Image: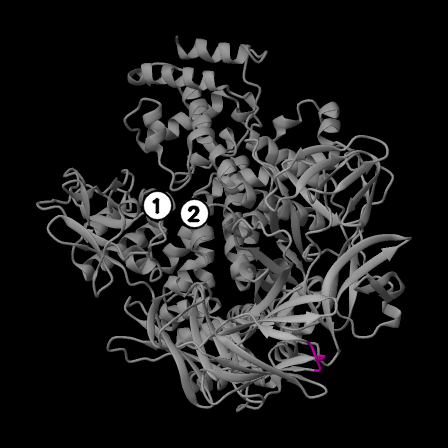
Amino acid sequence: MQFNKWILEFLAKRGLQHPDERPLFAYKTSTEEFESLRQLLQNYADTVHLSKYYPAAWLLFAAEWWKRDYAGGAWRWGPLCDAAGLKSLSHDKIRNLVINGHQQWCLQTPIKTEGKRFIGLVAMSGGLPMRLVEAAQGGLARLLRMVTEQALHYNLQDEQLRQAVEAQAALLPACYQQSPVYELLDNLIKAVLHIRATYALHDASDPIATLQTACPNWEDIFPITLDSQAAASLIKGLVRSVVNITPQSKQTPFQILKGLRFSTDGSPPQYELSFIMQAQAQSEHVASALGFPCEQLPPHFQLLLRVGGQEYIAGEALLRGEKYQLMAKPLPLIQALHDSAQLIISRWGATLHIANLPGGEELSHDEPLIFENTLPFARLITQGDARLKGDSALVAIPPKTIVFSEEGEAQELCNNLSNGMKLIELPTGDTRLVYQRQTFRIHISNSVPALPDSHWTGNTLEAISTPGLLFCGIPRLRVVQESGYVSDVPSHELFASVQNSEQRFEQATVFGLCRLIWRKDQQRLLSSRAVILPQDAGITYKPGASPLEGIIRLVNWPNLPIRSESAEIELKSNHNGSDLILDLKCSSARPVTSVPLSLQWPGGEQKLTLPFPAYGATLLRNNKPLYDNQVLTIDELVGCRALLMSAQGAAHWLLRLSTIGLNSRTRLSQEIKYIGVQEIRLFELIPKIQQMLSCHLRLDHTVLLELIHGHQKHASLEVGRYSTRICLDNQIAFLSDNAREIILEQTQAEDLLQALPLAEPERDAVNLPLSLSERVFTGNWQVDLPADAVGPWLIYSNSHTQLHCRPTITAQSNTITPDDISPLRKALCEADSPTRMTMLRTALQLMAADPENEDWLMLEQLLDKLHHLPLTSLDIFQALIREPLALAMATLLLENFSSRMAERLPSELPFEWLLLAPEHWSSTFTKIRQQLPADNPRRLEAIRNDILSKSQYLARWQPALSFIFEQGFHQHFGLNSQDVSFFLKNPLMLTECWLANLFDGENSAMQHMFRRNAPENQKYPEIGNIERDSFLKTEQGQELIRRSKLPVKDFKLSVVILPFMTAFDAYAGKGQLWQSEPERLFSLRTTRQFDAVWFDAAYQTGLAMAQTYSIEK
């Protein structure tokens, strides 16, 4: 069958004579058609250029292959070509196939012709890869809902929406974190928003059925076909959830979602707990949701989810202007539905606050759980009594519950949920559930208003407790209405119940362990277990004479029966009339770190876990002790924490970080104060440690972490980049950690090591075979590489492993470098390291001058294969940070470069984006614009949007660069900016305005920075006196002293002026000076880490000042 005939028949089955401009996924190619097309392409593989319609057939197959078979990771045309029966295709042939196929199908997707970005058109035509949908159900659903809610609340448009998708990319598997996938997700969210805006589904009992009636072809607008259960569940679940979202004047940035997850294989549904947050939120909304004073929220903090006794890293928050940028972290599957869930706000490893959130309450095992009747996820609505809106509901009940349905029949769906409960479906009307002499009433009707979100808030104690709600003083119940209005429930609707005796909050005394109940109009709306203590209750610790003894004082706690739940800890308690005093002794050989306690209140038992009061510091990794001065890698720091205990009134600890290097002339050091802190999550210090290590190019530097109290060191760790390296010996590869050879299990070792010729990254990587002896794995790999490659081979670990190894180079014997290869390929073939670096920089200089240089494609392919490796181990990155023009071009030109490297370059190399001169960016904008034809506005718009997306990703991490990019787009791409236009006409006026915002008055940015960082809590960073004093003598330095009104010797002045020093040197092209001096680079980094909000605003103003002075001269 000829290609023309096949395509005509394909169209005819869809009632078409010609392509109708729809994307290729919308033709809904069947599996039989896909296999038929595969066979046709393979049969005629040798006649590619003989058929006019081959490009159309090939592009359709490529789009379907992307959708069905693409498994993520670096894009390679090889597997696609193999599937089509082609051994290989040159870049020019692929280019022609894509362009011609695009024309034959009359596609409307713009073609971006640089580099390998033809894959973008294949991806847009194929739609979302099904393997991503199947592999990332939970994370993908979280990302889509979070970004969609943000788009509704903040009216995000185009690039803002794309940025929001990329900001939450960590929720996707790493192999799918790339530009084409982000664009498809962006289109999918726009499709959901279109449906919401176009069709009235808000009050529909079944939104999908209503949508099907109103728009039978609604599925066609999504860049995904719903012919799989996973895809259908994802999209239909998203539509159902989004149509009921009401844009609010006040948003709840964080939410804990509990529910039932139904499987597609008929197995029993599973309990599931997830954490959802907006991608950005106003700072006052964040503070309100957390129950924390807005002025005390730091500009950067971590979010940890505590469920029961387990803690999970849930995200981080960065203050950008008046909003926090909230970046989610992937969470494991959490199935602990009944445990309380709380959000911990942490700064450099220390807990600042513990917040209770809507949906996080502890659940009782003897009361019904009531869920929405939706698939594949049924959201938990409430527990106990309920009045629900809808046609039906799902209820999980203990097996012996008696069910009375007054207006229909309750149907049992499952009798073996994970905790022994059974699941039933309740009909419309009234149902009574009776269990252990308790009666629960559930009313279901379409006329009932929806229940608002609610959560308890008040003064909490930092302790692991069951019940999880532990308050000092009477708490408040906060309610978030559907409109977004937040209010506290009137106290006359709130009750506390102890042993079935209720007391109104209005007549409140100290309740102890009780049930907090919200009752309105004779209906119980909420019931939560809690422990309420006196307003001035607390917990103090007094170490004993040895690490095996100490005293815990429960200040202003009542006299209660209390016991230790550990056989190794002896407890003697007494009450002195106000405090409960616990005298503890440990009988184990090794000191314990925590005390599990059981307190018997009249209302029941409370479980309480507290630190053991032993003086000193204990280091733990995954709850196992570490040796003092133990050596770890950065990755091994994950799961590490330090437990601190000191005498009452002397709870001031100091954590010192210092670099250690071989024959190093510099020693960088930084200290962090911890006041009243009993635990430091050391893994939260990873960014600080990475930035210290990356001030040096040498791989063997380490950071010494010391915990100091009373001028005495109590514990220490040594942290390095990574210890495992790949070694070679007579065509055998093995792993070593410098001290010994590392032997892996055979299953871990298979396909672990790969090899790639550096000068030919377009080739497929070769998996090194295992070395076997009598069919037994020896722990080594065979190195037997093809002899036809140009240049040396890089041997490295694959992108999926958690084992980060230092790669190595091997050269084939008698390899001769051809004379006709490009400069970059020739440089990568050079064996001598200094000569290779010189050649790399020369090649990059040639590339920076020409966006069409062939080596850009080669570099893009190389980075696609190797971007997961440590950047310090690849010379090409060390050359890039020395060639700022080439780096700026790579950032705006190469696919995925900015999204992959924006954070990694400064954390792994002695480099900062802020040190690139504005002239480098301006020159890059000019060169790219000159390459574009003036008579093709459609292509100009496509390229402009592409560059805008890349620059805005970088600007999200480095906001101080935003104004530079605004100027570039204003001057070269026709994106008019009022600020830029005003600045170019009146540079001095805009600069004066910005300086006034920074320095003038009590509400200036500088005063806000001082209030955020009180000197008694924060150690202000310092910079070298020589550099500082030299700058202060300049005209600009004198102006800043006058504006700030700070004495020259004031310890805060360094933080105030260093952003301006950096900006003036960057503008003058002196960035390399900062990067080449570790002390200078470190002072820049510590100052920006101290308060990035101030630093970025001051740096941007400093650039404007430098540009203004330049214009005036």
Per the image, label 2 sits on a secondary structure element best described as helix
Rate crowding at label 1 as few (under 14), some (14 to 19) or many (20 or more) other CA atoms within 10 Å: many
The reply to whether discs 1 and 2 touch (Cβ–Cβ < 8 Å) is yes
Name the outermost residue toward the left: 814
Q: What residue type is disc 1 on?
A: Trp
Residue 830's disc is none
Work out how far the residue at label 1 is from the one at label 2, CA to CA, in angstroms.
9 Å
Of residues 902 and 362, the one drawn nearer to the viewer in this rendering? 362
1098 up-or-down from 1031: above or below: above
Q: Report which residue position mark 2 lands on.
A: 893
Of residues 574 and 725, the one drawn nearer to the viewer in this rendering? 574
Residue 856's disc is 1
Task: Look at 71% across and 30% down and name the residue there.
Answer: 208
583 up-or-down from 353: above or below: below
Q: Which residues are magenta?
A: 556-560
Per the image, label 1 sits on a secondary structure element best described as helix
